[in-house]
Amino acid sequence: MKVLVVGGGGREHALCWKIAQSPRVKQLHCAPGNAGIAQIAECHGIAATDLDGIVGLAQSRRIDLVVVGPEDPLCLGLVDRLTERGIAAFGPTAAAAAIEGSKAFCKDLLRRHRVPTPGFRTFEDPKYALAYLETLEDYPVVVKASGLAAGKGVTICEHAEQARTVVQDLMKHRKLGEAGATVVLEEFVRGPEVSVLAITDGQAIMPLEPARDHKRLRDGDLGPNTGGMGAVCPVTLPPRMRQQVDQQILLPVVHAMNREGRPFKGVLYAGLMMTAKGPVVLEFNARFGDPETQAVLPRIEDDLLPYLEAAAKGTLEKLEGPRFDRRVSVSVVAASEGYPEKPETGRPIRGLDAASGADGVHIFHAGTKRSGENVVTSGGRVLAVTALGASVEEARTKAYAAMDKIEFVGKQVRRDIALKEV
Ligand code: GLY
């Protein structure tokens, strides 16, 4: 079987690493890939958002399954384009990916179908958004750009003045472009956050074990929001909450998407807050999480490919859920100097060989590329080190020991990934 993975981040490296282990894979391609992926797949210099390029590649290489990693090509309609040409693809259509591409759509959907989510109002005119802020008595309030914003679209505003500034930046000054043309003002809720990634074929769901991202740049959940600085899997949830996630959130949303004429196939990623009243949905994503995937996939003992194929073909209910390694997985991200605002790139990375090779330790590249003899940084998040351990402490110790062998100028690493789980 010939498989093409679309994307070039740590998530796609983890996907390629896992898919490459399938005995059924004869050729593995990736576009555009990165320096780590290039060691296990044939990489093609085609951007994930170049839909013509990706479709042409899939046709010319007679690809049997395309696995789409990032949200942008999904929202642009890559899966629609591949499906029109009879090429099997893992991921939702553009209409279904709107669950991530438009927070306004997602929140309305959740409200219409009575799926638990914090209260909210949506605004398309800054005048009304600002007027609404004047009426609010309770702060913080969460200001969300409705469109895709690569992890930069959500701000927790502690007071009215901050909320006004954020709304003006998004709606009037278009700081995030069209992503901020519509904003959602959302009630702030407290509790631990959990990510549940469920593979679905539009009917059945196969939730993977819960994970936790660490979105802020600095230790202690301080600093700006990022795409994610590390993850841990599993996160222990009380069985009742686990059941609530499946029965009151994931399945109703899969059915709601069908009823609304947007059947969802791929990974439905529920970003949840575990409140005192039960789990509530903060957001849905239409794809595998990054860096959650780097923590979740190394724990899956079975071949992932049959699940991806079954989700694409609508035959998921025939499969048992995958078996998980009992060990804990901790994934720590190294980011470039200046990330997330203005990452510095082109810095040589040393110590990759010394860091790899320990049992249960995996290095997943993200923003890396080859430059002559060197591997150099080429993006905001550079790589992640994932380690499996019998306990969270052991996994953390192994992950940080490997991470400390990797050097590049300006490296930013949080030292407290999974510390709350210890
Ligand atoms: N971990 C956050 C995301 O994948 O969007």
Image: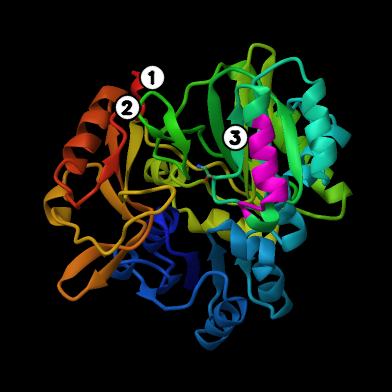
Asked if the beta carbon under badge 1 is closer than 8 A to the nearest atom of ligand 1, the reply is: no
- Tell me: residue 361, above or below residue 80: above
Report which residue position mark 3 lands on.
155
Report which residue position mark 1 lands on.
420
Q: Is residue 321 visible?
A: yes
The residue under the point 69% across, 75% down is: 81
* Circle 1: residue type: Lys
Asked which quadrant contains residue 372, the reply is: bottom left
Asked if the beta carbon under badge 2 is closer than 8 A to the nearest atom of ligand 1, the reply is: no
* Frontmost residue, 198 versus 364: 364
Q: Which residues are magenta?
A: 163-176
Foreground mark, 2 or 3, reads: 3
Report which residue position mark 2 lands on.
416
Residue 225 rendering spot, x and y as whole percentages: 49, 38
Foreground mark, 3 or 1, reads: 3
CA distance for labels 3 and 1: 23 Å
Marks 2/1 in contact by CB < 8 Å: the verdict is yes
* Frontmost residue, 168 versus 381: 168
Under circle 3, the secondary element is strand
